[in-house]
Structures are given as structure tokens and as C-alpha cells.
Amino acid sequence: MVTRLEKSSRLIDKATVLAKSGNWGEEARKINTSIIELDPKNADAHTRLARCHILLGNLDHAEQVYEQVLKIYPNNLVAKNNLAKIKKNRPLFTGDKLL
């Protein structure tokens, strides 16, 4: 029987391979989500997941993931810096009109 730790380790290996090959698509999103379900405090999985969301065009989700990281690890520089970039570079909208 595969333990939770073994399953998490295998998923981390897959996520790392995908990240190193520049694959940040749906498969990477699903794998990193699974890692977080097994280990909610895995900051690397959170930051990889946020990157997936950014590259998939889901800035709101990326922002939420970085905020989750900062609740767990308030000094995480990757999350701080990337969250600041999202907030700085996102156009401001009100309804369907650009401010």
C-alpha cells in the first residue's frame, strides 16, 4: 500500500519534471493541486500552482494561491514578489470598463 508520504513524493517528482521542462499547463495544475491536498503547507507546490494559474490566464486564482502561501509562510519572497507583480500589472476594471 502506498503511503501518503510516498504518494506526495511521487507527485512532487512529477511536478518538478514538468516545471523544469517548462510545462505549466493543466497537467501541472492538477498535480500541484493534488500535492497541496496531501500536504497543505507545501510552499513549493503552492508557488508552482500559482505559476500554472498565471500562465493559464487565471490571475485571480494565482493571487489567491500566493495569499494562501503568505498565510502559512509570511516571509516567502517568491509569493510576496509575484503577488506584488500581479497587483501592479493587472489593469483596473469596474464592471466591463477599464478605469
Image (cartoon, helix red, strand yellow):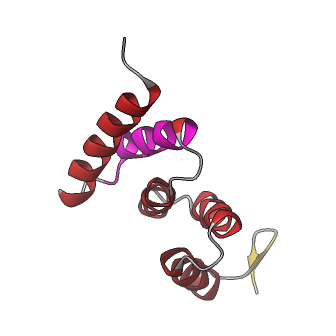
Residue 58 percent location from the top left of the image: 55, 58
Would you say 95 lies left or right of 32 here?
right
> Residue 76 or 96: which is nearer the viewer?
76
For the view shown, which residue lies furthest in the left direction? 21
Quadrant containing the N terminus in the rendered view:
top left
Q: What residue is rendered at 60% in x and 67% in y?
A: 66
Q: Check if residue 27 falls in the magenta segment.
A: yes
Would you say 32 lies left or right of 87 here?
left
Magenta-colored span? 24-37
Q: What residue is rendered at 66% in x and 63% in y?
A: 72
Residue 12 figure quarter: top left
Residue 16 percent location from the top left of the image: 27, 52
Q: Is residue 25 above or below residue 84?
A: above
Q: Check if residue 36 falls in the magenta segment.
A: yes
Q: Is residue 5 above or below residue 78?
A: above
> Residue 48 or 60: which is nearer the viewer?
48
> Residue 95 or 32: which is nearer the viewer?
32
Is most of the magenta stretch helix, strand or loop?
A: helix
Quadrant containing the C terminus in the rendered view:
bottom right
Q: What residue is rendered at 56% in x and 37% in y?
A: 37
For the view shown, which residue lies furthest in the top direction? 1
Q: Is residue 97 above or below residue 38?
A: below
Residue 92 percent location from the top left of the image: 72, 82
Would you say 53 lies left or right of 1 here?
right
Residue 40 percent location from the top left of the image: 59, 46
Q: How many marks?
A: 0
Q: What residue is rendered at 61% in x and 59% in y?
A: 65
